[in-house]
Amino acid sequence: MTSYYGVIGNRDYIKLKGQRTPFWEFLDVQPDGWLSSLVYKRTDVPRDRPMIWDCGAWSYRLSDEPDYSPKECADLYQQFAPPGSLVIAPDHMLIPGVDVARRREINLRNATEFLEVVSPEHKPMATVHGVTIEERVDAAVAYAKLGYQHIALGGMAAQAGKKELATEIAVALRAAVPKVHLHILGLSSPEYASRWKRIGIDSFDGSSHFKQAFTGGLFYTRDGTRLEKHQAARPGNDECGGIVAPECSCRACSILRAEGIDTRTYGSNENNMGRAAHNMNILMQAHAAAMSEHIVLVACCGKKLPNAAKAKDIYRSELFIKSRRYAEQHGDRWLILSAKHGVVDPEDVIEPYDETLNDKSAAERRVWSAKVAEQLQKHRHDRLTVLAGGAYCGWTDGFNAERPMQGLGIGQQLQYLLQHTEQQPNLF
Ligand SMILES: [Zn+2]
């Protein structure tokens, strides 16, 4: 699963009727986690979501040394970061005009020392910086060797416009440290969200929706996965144009509108903060749309090759082979429902086995269904098409699953697959 972490800064309140309410109470849904910084030293953070804490490397990027030693940093995290938080070792950004070689040394030394002093209540995280892809890969491998199980990729916001480069970096890091939790700092557009999911990045954050709400006065709307940005209107100034964006019914806009505050206009801090919360609502809707995949699930069958083979090749029934073709043509990806293994990746090599759910008791089927539901947790928001008989569908409650061949006999199923599959071109 690829998680989105919202960013908590220092001016995150909306004041209504004399009462200050944090902006996250104006969100339609909460993000998967939150990221905050020692720069703000806030203690009033949500406690019901995982958190990442950073040491604010951007704020001291022009200083010779990071603002904190590893020990000072660990002590500050102890004061501010709730138990269980991921906490980032004090790093130094590799930016133009600095002594890059020296900063590389600082980063490695600090990451090493930080492991000695970090509180056992916290999970240490190291940030990868680099000028080239190779350098970033080397840093990630070095941190993993030190024992880091959580690594962040930093300095990426500067690459925001270079999508292919940023993607190439993420792919290289994912391959270099396949087992660590990989977080990308500062790139959270819907398009990036979709890429991060495909690459298998564990989490990411970003705050440009926030900055744009304030400094740019931009109000988001969404067309599918695409964000559209409208200029907020200045009240009473028709020369700059009136309100151009449609009225919105998200939680932020609704609550504020009832108080006479329009998030589509400039005005008080409440207009701007409301717009920031609104933008985050729209961004998260776009994330959900961008990260949703269409996955086709195909049931295993009795007829198999006599030897170990890739799962996609080991099953030999006509129904399986036609279902596989359908899955490859219609799905972003596909998976196999195996009576023996539960959910199997088509590329996994497995041994032949002699098991089918059709022979199993109701209790055995329940155990199997619970295991499959667990294995498919990360696809809870994806669109699932299931090509399988009823015995293989006991797990679908709570999933967005459809069964286009439900109730059809075997002959009708083959017919359905034939009708909904492009045939190989006939060369004769
Ligand atoms: Zn809204």
Image: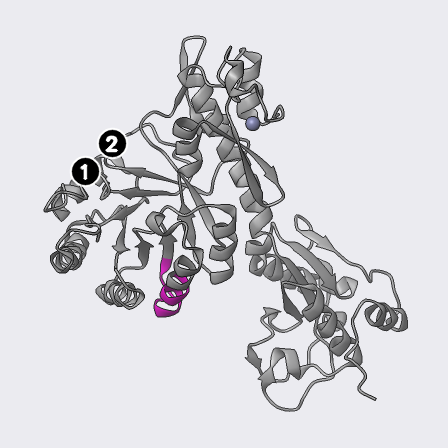
Q: Is residue 217 above or below residue 285?
A: above
How far across and down, in percent of the image, does residue 334 sit? 64, 67
Q: Quadrant of the C terminus?
A: bottom right
Q: Is residue 178 visible?
A: no
Residue 248 as seen in the image, left or right of residue 53:
right
Say which label, 1 or 2, has the lower sequence index. 2
How far across and down, in percent of the image, does residue 198 sit? 51, 60
Q: Alpha-carbon distance for marks 1 and 2? A: 9 Å
The three-letter code of the residue at mark 1 reads Leu
Numbered label attached to residue 41: 2
Which corner quadrant of the image does residue 172 belong to?
Answer: bottom left
As rendered, which of 86 and 139 lies closer to the eye?
A: 139
Q: Is 179 part of what is drawn in magenta?
A: yes
Callout 1–callout 2 Cβ contact below 8 Å:
yes
**Which residue is at the far top?**
17
Q: Is residue 4 above or below residue 182?
A: above
As rendered, which of 17 and 65 lies closer to the eye?
A: 65
**Residue found at x 31% / y 56%:** 151
Instruction: Count up the numbered dots.
Output: 2
Q: Secondary structure at mark 1?
A: helix
Magenta extent:
170-181
Q: Would the CB of label 1 be found within 8 Å of ligand 1? A: no
**Residue found at x 51% / y 10%:** 236
**Residue found at x 21% / y 35%:** 79
Numbered label attached to residue 76: 1
How far across and down, in percent of the image, does residue 115 sit? 19, 55
How far across and down, in percent of the image, does residue 4 sit? 45, 45
Which corner quadrant of the image does residue 412 belong to?
Answer: bottom right
Q: Would the CB of label 2 be found within 8 Å of ligand 1? A: no
Which corner quadrant of the image does residue 72 belong to?
Answer: top left
Residue 66 as seen in the image, left or right of residue 324:
left
